[in-house]
Image (tube, rainbow, N blue to C red):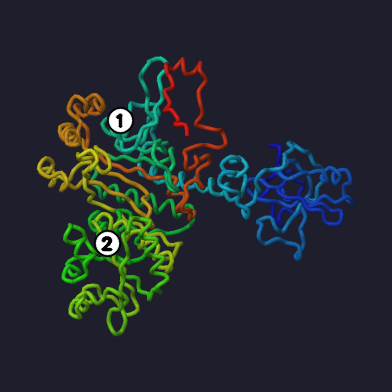
Amino acid sequence: MMRTHTCGQLRLSDDKKKVTLCGWNHSRRDHGGVIFIDLRDRYGLTQVVFDPSSNKKVHGEAEHLRREDIVLVKGTVRPRGPTLENPKLATGQIEIIAEDISIIAKSDTPPIEIDDFKDASEEMRMKYRYLDLRRPKMQRNLMMRCKVVNAARAHLLDNDFIELETPLLIKSTPEGARDYVVPSRVHPGKFYALPQSPQLYKQIFMIAGFDRYFQVAKCLRDEDLRADRQPEHTQIDIEMSFVEPEDIYHMLEGMIQRVFRDTINTEIKAPFPHISFDDAMDKYGCDKPDIRYDLHLRDVSDIMKKSSFGVFNSVISNGGVVKCVIPETDLSRKQIDELEAYAQGFGAKGLAWMKVTDKGLESSIVKFFTPELQKELLHALGAKVGSTILFVADKKKNANEILNRLRQKLAKDLKLYDPKEFKFCWIVDFPLFEWNEQENKWDTMHHLFCKPKTEHIKFLRSDPGKVKASLYDLVVNGVELCSGSIRISDPVLQEEIMDIIGYKKEDAHKRFGFLLEAYRYAGPPHGGVGVGLDRLTAMVLGYEDIREVIAFPKTKSAECLMDGCPSELQDKEMKELHLKMDLPKVKKD
């Protein structure tokens, strides 16, 4: 090895030791002719001293060092002295008095600061990602990702799981988002797809008898991006045979506990509470609720329809609802106006409100409610004096979405939760189907391999919207961490689900024939989950943007500014792949 120690390793106990360090010149300071540099590697920083009275030649070479030059330094460890120690550094009690230096590589002036305290713009960070990744914070993030993976892997291996791999070049099968496709050179006109998940292949593993499987899998989906979504992401993919949902809950809870204990020394309480999909939508307005705070949604339609307030009456008579949230604070009119503008950004037509005072309700709309109706409302809501009731009147789906957004904003603005707390819950009993109004047909809410609850199979043809599935999501602090289900292992039932969503038998066998064929030879009942590794790591570190824990992420427009992809192919490559461009014509002004 070129070095004897790393830049984060030496301590007072190493006093007078001869050492060799390698790293990047993080900073250079000249104090009255004595030069100090902070030498950096992924383990930390060590201060190196170049004193002309000790070694004039070495000092002279240090005068020409620039930021980010890579150097090899030989020298002797010595204490800094009590008044010169840096308590912020693990190596802050010592320094190296340099006796020799070799410049391994010279650096141009970096276009961004290699510093945790000076964030560059997103564009510059993505373009010069190799420099951004030198920052101690980013290196800590990726090292944490490694710890998360290893903790999860250790838990699964301890529980008799087998780590297996599934292919990246597969048959295109619809799974919710658009596929990324790869043209075949040797089979003109045919394409591979990149997997949105290993869904079908892990089910094949179960049929093959590998009853406990996992892998750290790349998943690729051509979909619109946001802070917690990338075109390629990584999931810890898990499947188990001969299980009920409770077995999967228990296994996942143990894995989550292991991850948080091994990475940030935090104990997570289990078992996690279960909330039905219907209850989550009614109480929180979404299927991934943040349960660190209450602030539940309340449906007051039955009371409001008794009032003479035309806005509410019109919505209710047209099949809509009136729902509210009740922050326990006396919001000012300015705050209410800001909340109304915020709600309108998500489609709200307005935001009605009432304040709860010791004299009763106060608002410009109170005149439309009789004293008896006001008392009924207060009794039903149990609203405390000093609270503000915020109402949204709309179709149920819209009202839930708007109030869900308001609930989150209020909780953040009013500091209703501890940002360092982790509250997990399982969302269960999802509908198997949802109605596609654009295509006038039923679609599966998650994917078409989720098993309907046994007691609901009788509704498959007569009332698909009534069918619940053995389907579950794990949510933490309002973020969906994983999704899974008990799978359909009966090929007849699987074909029926396919038929309901529009795949006729011939088409179903063309797309999924290999799976249906495999089930002819007896597949065990099985189920599993896919845990978002990027989201889990971001959650452990306290980030909302998963790009902070991905080495080479894409921008929001699905581009990599560092390598320039996606990029065009050369004519020769297009010809080899039997492809021709047919780009839409750009209209001229």
Residue 81: where, in percent of width, then height? 77, 62
Q: Quadrant of residue 450?
A: top left
**Which quadrant, please, contains the N terminus?**
top right
Q: Which amino acid is tagged 2?
A: Lys
Helix, strand or loop at mark 1:
loop
Side of 588 where 45 appears, left or right: right
Side of 444 where 56 appears, left or right: right
CA–CA distance in space, label 2 to label 1: 35 Å
Residue 534: where, in percent of width, then height? 45, 45
Pick the residue in front: 317 or 66: 317
Q: Which residue is mark 2?
A: 283
Whether residue 559 can be seen here? yes
Q: Are marks 2 and 1 in contact (CB under 8 Å)?
A: no
Residue drawn 27% across the image and 39% down it: 447
Helix, strand or loop at mark 2:
helix
Q: Earlier in the sequence, mark 2 or mark 1?
A: 1
Residue drawn 42% across the image and 36% down it: 218
Q: Quadrant of residue 310?
A: bottom left
Q: Which residue is mark 1?
A: 173
| Residue found farthest to the front | 589
